[in-house]
Amino acid sequence: MPETVSPSDLFRRIVEAVAQRRQSEILDDYYAEDVVVEHPFMIPEPTTTRGREQLRKRMTSVKNLPITMEIGGIIVHETADPEVIIGEFESHVTSTVTGARITTGNVLVLRVRNGRVISSRDYHNHARLAEFMASQQ
C-alpha cells in the first residue's frame, strides 16, 4: 500500500472490505504488524487485540457468521492530528438464516501511520449484535 493513502481513504477501504466480508484478506496491506485494536463495548467485556496475527484470527472467525452486511452513512471527521480520523458508518446486517435485518451505528477512531492502521478503537453496539445473532438460531 502506498504511503500516500490518507487515513480517510484507508478508513473507506476498510469499511468496504468489512461490507464484503473480506476483513482477513486486507490485513497485510491495511494494518501495521503491531496494530492494537480495542473494542470497548465488546460483550461480555472489552477486548484488546494486539498484533496483526491475533487480529487475523479474530477476523477469520467473524467471517463465517451467517449474515450479509451493507454499509451506509459513511462520515469521516478529520482531527487536529493528521494521523487520526474518526469514522462513522451504519451496518445493515441481514441474517442468511431467517432474512431478519437490523441496523447499527458504528464509530472507529483510527491512527494511521505510513499508510497502515497502527491503532483503532472500534465502538460498535455489540450487545445488539449478540442479541440479534442469538435470535436467529
Image (tube, grey):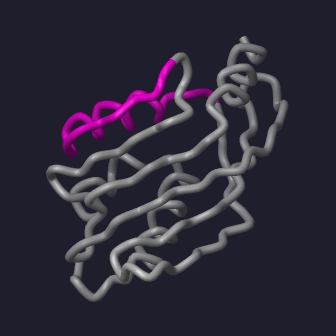
- Residue 59 versus residue 67: which sits nearer the camera? 59
Q: Is residue 94 above or below residue 65?
A: below
Residue at (47% x, 68% y) in the render:
11
Left or right of residue 14: residue 128: right
What quarter of the picture does the N terminus occupy? bottom left
Left or right of residue 27: residue 102: right
Left or right of residue 44: residue 7: left
Residue at (64% x, 51% y) in the render:
106
The image quadrant of residue 104 is top right
Left or right of residue 65: residue 38: left
Residue 119, position as x, y percentages in the image: 31, 55
Q: Which residues are magenta?
A: 45-66
What quarter of the picture does the C terminus occupy? top right
Residue at (70% x, 14% y) in the render:
134
Residue 115, position as x, y percentages in the image: 26, 75
Q: Residue 52 lies in magenta, yes or no?
A: yes
- Residue 17 versus residue 80: which sits nearer the camera? 80
The image quadrant of residue 51 is top left
- Residue 98 versus residue 46: which sits nearer the camera? 46
Q: Is residue 31 above or below residue 127?
A: below
Residue 97, position as x, y percentages in the image: 74, 23
Q: Residue 58 lies in magenta, yes or no?
A: yes
Which residue in the rendered view is the most extreme toward the left?
Answer: 33
Residue at (16% x, 50% y) in the render:
34
Residue 96, position as x, y percentages in the image: 71, 30
